[in-house]
Image: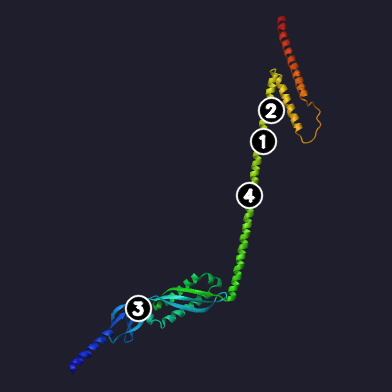
Amino acid sequence: MDFTGFDISVGVFVILAILIILAGVKQIPQGYNHTVERFGKYVRTLRPGLNLIVPFIDRVGMKLNMMEQVLDVPTQEVITRDNASVSADGVMFFQILDAARAAYEVRGLENALLNLTMTNIRSVMGSMDLDELLSKRDEINNRLLRVVDEAAAPWGIKITRIEIKDINPPADLVEAMGRQMKAERDKRASILEAEGQRQSEILKAEGEKQAQILEAEGEKEAAFRAAEAREREAEAEAKATQMVSDAISNGNPQAINYFVAQKYTDALAKIASANNQKVIMMPLEASSLIGSLAGIGEISKELFKKDDDGSSRRGRTTPSISGDK
């Protein structure tokens, strides 16, 4: 089969067209940006999707991952402010926001970020004491994030997070910290025990004080009621005496007999209830008691009789005097 010049020209043209299309059409995957260079100079950035460039004049320069990336920070030795040596490592999350600046503002982006992070870890952790280093990890992370993000901003990089993974003091220092922690806990336990005993003593004293107050109030109430009872008894006694006196003045001798007999009986009851032994010289038989009461009654009758006779004489004398006059 003979090929003419025209056939050869068409074939060359088709091959050249295919090469031009392949050189001028670029497909960018999602999550990536490509830079375009024209004669070695940056001209624009290709976004995800289908893009066209000038064939054989423009070329793809840098292919950059625009997704958030993770960078491990290796273990390094850090000297704290109180001269304690610790080892620390971490992890950093970053994302490229500007592909052109990330491609052309710094050479070796990941290496630059890694060295920047390690340097600032030594600076931030070295400015703190060991106790602060172990207890303020969030503060360390925040300070590192602020400093590194500010330093990486000219490169078109956004530092999203920096985390310190492990802080490892030397073994002898860990042992000393364990002894210190144990001593501190024993101290707190002793303080709590002393506080408990103190509170118990205070509550006990308060209880005794309250008991004494209640006892004094009870004694006061009992004394008041006893005095009131004695007052009422005295009033009753006075009233009984007044009634006996009124009865005697009205000519009733039985009242004084009852009164004297009651007093006599009460006195005998008090003498008989005494604990010590006594010799009693008085008539204790019932007949003697009745005889005594009868004698008192006779005396009272005699007195009342004399009073009546005197009143009668005075009554008879008064008319005779009036007649003489």
The numbered mark, 1 or 2, whose residue comes first in the sequence reads: 1
Between the C-alphas of marks 3 and 1, the distance is 105 Å
Q: Where residue 110 is drawn, which disc sits there?
A: none
Residue 207 circle label: 4
Please give the label number shown on residue 237.
2
> At label 2, which amino acid type do we have?
Glu
Hey, what amino acid is under mark 3?
Answer: Tyr
Amino acid type, residue under disc 4 in the picture: Gly
**Residue 103 visible:** yes
Which circle's residue, 3 or 4, is located before the other in the chain?
3
Q: Foreground: 265 or 94?
A: 265
Q: Residues within 10 Å of mark 4 (few under 14, many from 20)?
A: few
Rendered-image quadrant of the C terminus: top right
Indicate the amino acid at tag 1.
Ala
Q: CA distance from mark 3 to mark 4?
A: 80 Å
Which residue is rendered at x = 74% and y = 12% of the image? 309
**Callout 3: helix, strand or loop?**
strand
- Secondary structure beneath dot 4 equals helix
Q: CA distance from mark 2 to mark 4?
A: 44 Å
Query: Callout 2: 10 Å neighbours few (<14), some, many (20+)?
Result: few
Residues marked 1 and 4 touching at CB (< 8 Å): no
Q: Secondary structure at mark 2?
A: helix
Q: Residue 224's spot in the image, x, y percent? A: 65, 37
Q: Position of residue 36 (x, y in %)?
A: 32, 82
